[in-house]
Image: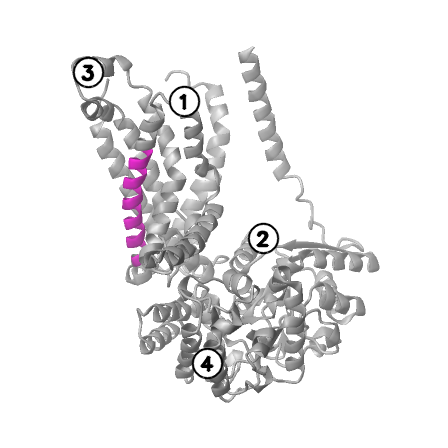
Amino acid sequence: MRNRDFSFWLFLTPVILSLSLVILVPFVYGFIYSFTNWNGMVATEFLGFKNYITLFKDAEFRASIWFTTKFAICSVILLNFLGLGLALLVTRNLKTNNLMRTVFFMPNLIGGLILGFIWQFIFISVFGNLGDLLGIEALTGWLSTTATGFWGLVILTSWQMAGYIMIIYIAYLENIPKDLLEAAEIDGASSFQRFRNITFPLVAPAFTVSMFLTLSNSFQIYDQNLSLTNGGPFNSTQMVAMNIVKTAFTENKMAFAQSKAVIFFVIVAAVAITQVYYNKKKEVDM
Amino acid sequence: MKSKKTLISLVSVFLLSIFALVGCSSDDDKGKDKASGDQITIDIFQFKVEIKDQFEELVKVYEDENPGVKINVKTVGGGNDYGASLKTSFSSGEEPDIFNVGGPSSVEEYREYLADVSDTKAVEESIDGTLTAVQDGDEVLGLPFNQEGYGLIYNKAIFEEAGLNADDIVTYADLEEAVKLLDSKKDELGIDAVFALPAKEKWVLGDHISNMFIASDFNDDITEAYNSKTIAFDKGDELKRYLDLQNSHSVQPVLSLDYSQQVEQLFSLEKVAMIQQGNWVYNSVYDMDPELAETGIGILPVPVEGFEGKIPAGVPMFWAVNSKSDEKVVQASKDFLDWVYTSETGKTAVLEDFKFIPAYKGYDASKIADPLSQTIYEYAEAGNTLEGWVYQAAPTGWTQESLGVNIQKYLSGDLKWEEVISQSRAKWEAERK
């Protein structure tokens, strides 16, 4: 790290500049505004912690935090399970490997809004018609109850992100030295034993990365939420990001929304840091 | 070879990003020297995406007629998007000279920027009652865009086949009877249900359906609603009865039924006999089935006790002129808006290109493009309207986020009707403390 000369800083300047302009400055401003009665244009009064006190009494906000947490837990588990599963599948020596990788990764290229609308059609019309045809009551009326709305969101997110997580696992899986596996095989380890004792520990860093990604992503989901359920029925599938946007723009309480955003930031940061810390401890060095 | 390629791509990426950065800052000399010399520049920021192209056409005509005026139109669509973008442009100092406000709460929010337009011809010509939301003493702070109205839109062919005459449906009992009749002949008529109630849309529940039943709490006066500390819900039971009627005769499940399913899949394909919607559905129905749209549908008022035969019609948005703009620009802006709504060219465009229901007198109703709008304009001119879209005067977000959500909970069985009323009222009172 001796090469921090002039050119080092020269190349870094654009990044630092744009980062502070679009992230740092707004963040600090937002933090300050959350203590005032800012309405989007002017702040006339300093309110202290009043916004934060109201916020803790806001049942809807609590409900959306709880909903988001449940959602995050479900999708983190499902996504990593699926991602690793798919990765194991496409790292075998099959002829269709590349094709399958592309297919699994594809949903990730479609924007969340469009995905939401596509799945809305699937859940409501396709499921509904199938249910009518086969006489299965459970298939009709998806997205019209809280539970189906929740699972709808989980399915949608898993479908979208599993391919992306798969790529991360593939990268680590392909880095596992073949001789280790070979040696184990010669020693008579079954394929499950090889996975359990060699593959699994060696892809632990991938767990750190992909769990961090899935966790922070699931907490911040907005567009899929908006297009799939729009928080309905009766705002019961409304995630935190959506709750904040609505407070700001539908109810026109900018400062209050800002304070929600600050709390949201604290929660996500705390969860993510804890997760990375514990995952890091589990990693093994070669 | 390979390193050369990498180098070329790196250089091109670098160049591209420089172009992108430069491109961002290139067109900011617009609107800088407003009203310098004889040239006047007016920046318009409007919300109605549906008329974007037609409006720009009209602006061009005006610019040709008035060489000294240059008008820039910017359109950002939809309720939330527009509100947020307008706020952003104000807080960043790029204030438009003409912009849109809807209802008393946004009037209050932008109060210091709103110029008095009471001296315009358009104000004189406006239909009675269309200005109440933007009046402050003697001052008039905005010009109505257009009128919109809603009611029960019905399929004429289905009604005829069932032996129903829409004109006979006047009282609530009539409506109930008609629904029963239609329901009993469902198979014969080939419909899925009588209604399609899009309960997924909080605006249908909280704004439109409820509005008819809460308007009388404030004597149909939008200003009174805006100042009211509480809401009585005198017609709460009637609202419940009307919701139940629709819900029990609607395509299920209502909670995942949205606007496009209601209008396009169900009504336009003639799977239901009636929907509660407004004149704005005309274009969607037209896209699906032009013949049905032109001759096959009609609109009848929702029979609210004491207000039978009245259609709720109102002004969704107003044009406002920025009072902080240069004096000359303010005058030019007023002249332009006047021209849009009172000149012959403007009137034709408003009727035929924008397909608006005019909020002004002296328009030729027979030229209104679609039958729904025509009926509503006739109701409005005859004074048969339920005045004041009082939902615009409710605390911000209350109609949808409180009342609408509570009605959804009621429809799903999670909340009793009394709780819908009491919780919504409590929220209103809390917001108006």
Quadrant of the rendering where the C terminus of chain A is positioned: top left
Magenta stretch: give its range. A63-83
Q: Does A82 appear in magenta?
A: yes
Q: How many marks?
A: 4
Q: Mark 4 touching mark 3, by CB under 8 A?
A: no
Q: Mark 4 touching mark 2, by CB under 8 A?
A: no
- Colouring of the image: one colour
Q: Which mark is residue A184?
A: 3
Q: Nearer the viewer, residue A156 or B390?
A: A156
Identify the subunit bearing mark 1.
Answer: A
Q: Tell which tag, 2 or 3, sits nearer the viewer.
A: 3
Q: Which mark is residue A95?
A: 1
Q: Residue at x 32, y 57 (%)?
A: A138
Q: Nearer the viewer, residue B175 or B30?
A: B175
Q: Is residue B386 visible?
A: no
Would you name the residue on which mark 4 appears? B180
Q: What's under tag 2, amino acid-wise? A: Gly
